Image (tube, rainbow, N blue to C red):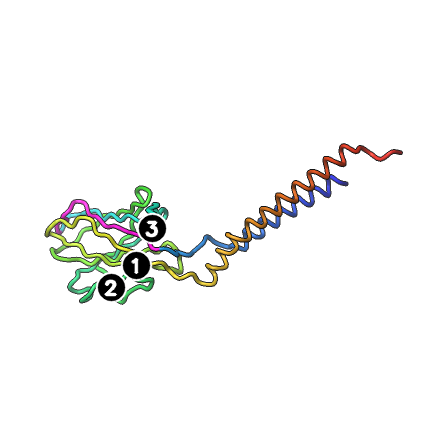
Amino acid sequence: MMRRATLGVRWSSIALAFCLLALAGEPVRAHATLVLGEVTLSPDPPLPGESFVVRVTLHDPAMAPIEDAVVFIEVREQQRATAELPLASTERPELPDPDLEERLLEVAPARYETEIVVAGTGEYHLLVRDRTFEWEEANASVLIEVGGAAVGSIPFILPPTAIGPRSLWTWLVWLVGLPIVAGVVVTVLVLTSGRSRGAAEEGPPPA
């Protein structure tokens, strides 16, 4: 009987842990810090009518690489994009339809690339969009020149996105709830294991 009770408590503890994991529901969706980015081109300078690689690197303020991001670029001729570059934002700016839009592939930790071709010379507006999380966006603008001088390395900053109630709840579950449940599970397992050992040492009651 003691063994059955012990197994029941253990399974109940494990079930409780899984229930709390289910409450979390989804990965943390908060992008709560600045992201430091950089755009480079290869070859540099790019030439009209010839393919070139757009390379984006992403790091957090501590320069740790940001991996598994979902990054898009939208490309527009600057003369028809807007008189001024849109500021970095967590809302998609109102702009004409892009000349092309591409998702970048992660080719190394924190490094994302795609290959594009543009027809004419001149300045082009690149809107870099971080769409890693379904309900959040962070974007920044950079200018590149095609058929001109070398572009070099162009830095940009993606702003932090707001943490909504749903994201805040998820943060609390992961940061507070899971350690508490882990402690409860370990405590219960230690106590029940001790009781089982004590009962085994005492042996069966005298007839």
Q: Which residue is mark 1?
A: 139
| Residue 111 percent across, percent down from the top left | 29, 45
* CA gap, disc 1 and disc 2: 9 Å
| Residue 149 percent across, percent down from the top left | 11, 50
Q: What SS does tag 3 mark?
A: loop
Name the amino acid, label 3.
Pro
- Mark 1 residue crowding within 10 angstroms, few (<14) / some (14–19) / many (20+): many
Q: Which residues are magenta?
A: 34-48
Position of 117 relative to 6 (above/below): below
Position of 50 relative to 87 (above/below): above
Q: Residue at x 15, y 46 (%)?
A: 44
- Mark 2 residue crowding within 10 angstroms, few (<14) / some (14–19) / many (20+): some
Q: Residue at x 34, y 48 (%)?
A: 62
Q: What SS does tag 1 mark?
A: strand
Q: Quadrant of the N terminus?
A: top right
Q: Which residue is mark 2?
A: 86
- Closer to the camera: disc 2 or disc 3? 3
Position of 161 relative to 65 (above/below): below
Q: Nearer the viewer, residue 147 or 170?
A: 170
Q: Nearer the viewer, residue 125 or 63?
A: 63
Q: Quadrant of residue 207?
A: top right
Reading the chain from its start, which is encountered first: label 1 or label 3? Answer: 3
Tag 2 and tag 3, C-beta contact below 8 Å: no
Q: Nearer the viewer, residue 5 or 160?
A: 160
